[in-house]
Image (cartoon, rainbow, N blue to C red):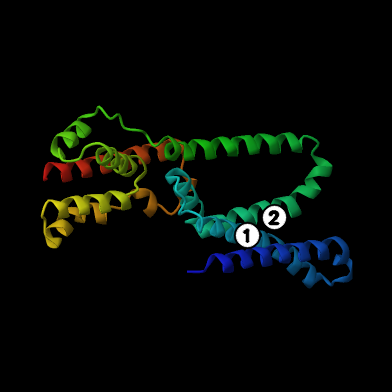
Amino acid sequence: MFSKKSKLVALILSVFLLLILRYILDYRVEALSQVPQLIAYASLPVAGGLIALSFFSLLGTFMDVENSVTSRLLERASEVPARNFFIGFLMTAYLNLVRPPLTANVSFLPYMEWVTIALTVYVIYTMTRPSTNGFHVSSEGPGWKRHVQEVKRETGRDLTRITSVMEEFIDHGVKGPLLVYLALHLQRLGETEESILKALNPLINYQEDVRRHKSYFLIFPWTKRKLAMRNKKERENLLKAFLKNR
């Protein structure tokens, strides 16, 4: 695992490489023979891909922020390096190799680009909306009523805390705080380490489908919403099963 500093250095070097290639193609390309010209043109989108790869990888180092929604968005943006490289590769190839000759022959090209940008923003919004909205669960649902009945010792700030970490798990799949809280609660009730580990094992081993889906950002928005709803229901059932056995 590379450090934040090394990722920043990689980003700077990638940008520097792109600038050098751009300078060569703009001012020195005629002095080069055919083979070096082809190498320079082919290296340009690769440099763009490296910039995108380094940039999103650097973003991933900031995912330990207090805001869970922001943290998950940063994590998802950096979790597929091949996708990030491919995005940077295509954008650089288009802007530097494809767009210049098209501009001279296609007068309405800017309008097409704005429509493409608008559609891209809309798709990204619809894909990330389940994360930001979190499919919030009503606190009056049957699962929460059962929880309030079972954990009678938790009052005041403790009750607010356990409700919060349960919502974080069900809505966003953040299970770390929930596992810590439940482990401490079971320990206060006199449970042994072996019984605590056995009780929390289903929650510990839980892994939502999205993390196993390598092309998560490439699937259709409605498919993504259905997947998010199914993951949320699975987390809710998992938590209900745990509370039922307490």
**Vertical arrangement, residue 130 with respect to residue 218, above or below:** above
Residue 85 in percent (x, y) is at 58, 58
The residue depicted at 17 percent of the width and 59 percent of the height is: 197
The residue depicted at 64 percent of the width and 53 percent of the height is: 90
Badge 1 local density, few (<14 within 10 Å), some, or many (20+)?
many
In this rendering, the label closer to the viewer, 2 or 1: 1
- The amino acid on which the numbered mark 1 sits, given as a three-letter code, is Gly
- The disc label shown at residue 49, or none: 1
**Left or right side of 200 for 58:** right
Asked which secondary structure carries label 1, the reply is helix
The one of 76 and 113 positioned closer to us in this rendering: 76
- Residue at the farthest top position: 140
The one of 154 and 213 positioned closer to us in this rendering: 154
Q: How many marks?
A: 2
- The amino acid on which the numbered mark 2 sits, given as a three-letter code, is Ala
Badge 2 local density, few (<14 within 10 Å), some, or many (20+)?
many
Residue 13 in percent (x, y) is at 68, 67
Instruction: Tell me the quarter of the picture where residue 138 sits.
Output: top left
The one of 90 and 10 positioned closer to us in this rendering: 10
Work out whether mark 2 precedes mark 1 in sequence or the reverse, and give the earlier one. Answer: 1
In this figure, which residue is indicated by the disc labeled 2? Answer: 93
**Left or right side of 81 for 92:** right
The residue depicted at 51 percent of the width and 69 percent of the height is: 2
CA–CA distance in space, label 2 to label 1: 9 Å
